[in-house]
Amino acid sequence: MNRTLVLGAEIDVISFAGAIELALGMMNERRGAYVVTPNTEIVLKAKNSPALRKAIRGAALSLPDSVGVMIAGRILKAPIEARIPGIDFAAELLSRMAPEGKRVFLLGAKEGVAARAAEALIAAYPGLVIAGTGNGYFDSREEIALVERINAASPDLLLVCLGTPKQELWMHRNAARLRVGLMAGLGGALDVFSGDVPRAPARWRRDGLEWLYRLLREPRRINRAVKLPLIVFAAACSRIKGERKTWQRES
């Protein structure tokens, strides 16, 4: 599998179906691999953060989540195969896990959100087992106990929804200590799964306008929306400088 660079962030060149099959295989291997889903905000943060770039590099899968990353990839002539929204990726994994009675642990968001997401996921995917839940408000002193609780639950999938860069750094730091099938960093996915935050209609999502839908509903997100022109500008500057590289990923 090839990887390409988008402003210093490594992105896998892979289809949605290919990513699902690889993720299921890694889940069965139970080696604590993790998945990152770089969107516009993550890529821009990684551009100025060596620690975040290292965490992305250490991921078993790095999936292009947003239209901004796709546009930047086209400007840089980076061969990104398809946009793979993290929440769609997770939903497909859960649908494949449910018939086998596999276990998922939900970590992140405010108190109570993960529990509501768990109820919704059980209803949506009969057979899925919720191995445990936890909110995203913990500090370094509580981390060891949290890792032990997750290990005791032995989930096949751990959804880590702590926001960027906390979730990527947390997975990278704890990958060797966690006895899980697979981890995936998914930002605000639990808010969506719980029903607290509605997703854009399918047509908006197909057209890559989910960010605009969220902005229209929540104008306070304007600071995040302006990152789209920023990544386009940064990619244009990077192309002028010739900063682009693609390579065969080491196994």
Image: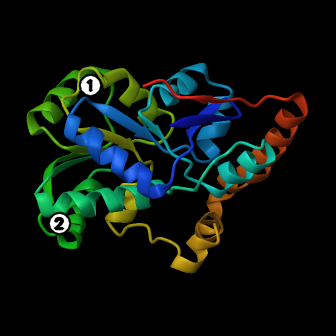
Under tag 2, what secondary structure?
helix
Q: Residues within 10 Å of mark 2 (few under 14, many from 20)?
A: some
Res 107 visible:
no
Q: Separation of disc 2 and disc 1 at Cα? A: 27 Å
Name above or below for residue 167 compared with residue 197: above
Quadrant assignment for the C terminus: top left
Q: Give the residue at x 62% y 44%.
A: 41
- Residue 96, given in percent of the width and then of the height, sits at 25, 60
Specify the quadrant of the image occupied by residue 237.
Answer: top right
SS for dot 1: helix
Number of other residues with Cα within 10 Å of mark 1, as a class: few under 14, some 14 to 19, many 20 or more = few
**Label annotation for residue 143:** 1
Q: Is residue 219 visible?
A: yes
Depth check, mark 2 against mark 1: the one in front is 2
* Pointer 2 with pointer 1, Cβ within 8 A: no
42, 84: nearer the viewer: 84
Please report the residue visible at 34 percent of the width from the left and 61 percent of the height from the top: 92
Q: Position of residue 243 (x, y in %)?
A: 79, 28
Vertical order, 225 against 145 (above or below): below
Give the residue type at disc 1.
Glu
Q: Which residue: 53% across, 73% down?
A: 200
Residue 228 falls left or right of residue 179: right
Query: What residue is disc 2 on?
Result: 122
Kindly identify the residue that appears in the image at 51 percent across and 46 percent down.
63
Instruction: Reply above or below: 51 against 45.
Output: above
Horizontal side of residue 31 vs 193, given as left or right:
left
Position of 179 with respect to 86 (left or right) is left
Q: Position of residue 40 (x, y in %)?
A: 64, 47
Residue 31, by quadrant, is: top left
Circle nearer the N terminus (2, 1):
2
Residue 128 pos. (x, y %): 15, 60
The amino acid type found where label 2 is placed reads Ile
